[in-house]
Amino acid sequence: MPRFSPVLRTLQVLIGLAVLLFAGRMLVLIVPYLSFEPGIEFLTTKTAATNSNLLFRVGFYVHITSSLVALLVGLPQFFPQLMRHRRVLHRQLGKVYVATILALAAPSGLVLALYANGGLVAKVGFTMQCLVWWLATWQAYQLARGRQWQAHTEWMVRGFAITLAAMSLRLESYFMYYFLGTKPMETYLTVTWLSWTGNLLLAEVLLQVGLAKRLLRDFAAPKPSLKAQPAVPA
């Protein structure tokens, strides 16, 4: 299996830049919430009872911050040319990524799913997303511990595809509302499911064409040449 071609490398870089821009945008959106005021931005869509609920409030703040951390520490792992000679950093970032999702981002997402707008369809959609996110990340972690690197990489791709669901949700919402003319609630309920199932479907397509093998080949350090060096003339 060849390594990334120049075209695929360019696409990889462009996607990485898009994710970084999204992370920067999310940071800008998160900052106002750090005042812990209940009546701002997204929180205005919730009832007073929900905003005063301690479980919801803790889940909300944990989720918005930990999801951003997971996005930022997970992204470099998909640029193996950067990690090739930084394997300790690769492992440490991986541990932070896994711990952040398993202990913080996915559990807090489950809390938010209980209070999701849109009724049962939305609640089930967000619940399933968090459960699959947790399980995919756990599976990737277990495979890494068993040194099953290709399977580990495949499950990391699946898990990170769900990490990117927040980005997909916003892009899909914009496209559906402004280009397809769908109604707000119709748009919301659709992207609740499409944002993560669509990402998983795309991840499976990429895995079928050898993405995991390409990432592993790219991560492997170049082997030293076995050819004998020419003798230095006296």
Image (cartoon, rainbow, N blue to C red):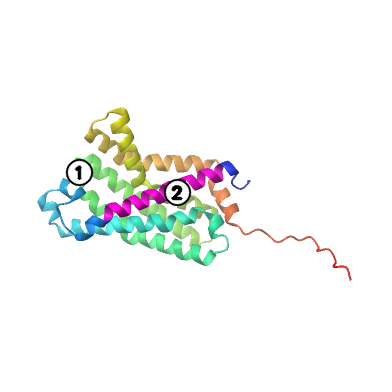
User: Is any atom of residue 25 visible in this view?
Assistant: yes
Residue 102, located in which quarter of the rendered image? Answer: bottom left
Q: Disc 1 versus disc 2: distance between alpha carbons?
A: 31 Å
Residue 4 percent location from the top left of the image: 59, 46
Mark 1 touches mark 2? (CB < 8 Å): no
Residue bearing the label numbered 2: 17
Q: Secondary structure at mark 2?
A: helix
Residue 228 lies in the magenta stretch:
no
Amino acid at dot 1? Asn
Residue 117 - label:
1
Q: Which residues are magenta?
A: 8-30
- What residue sits 28% from the left and 52% below the top? 29
Q: Nearer the viewer, mark 1 or mark 2?
A: 2
Quadrant, the C terminus = bottom right
Relative depth, front residue between 124 and 94? 94
- What residue sits 43% from the left and 56% below the top? 74
Of the image marks 1 and 2, the number of the one nearer the N terminus: 2
Relative depth, front residue between 214 and 8? 8
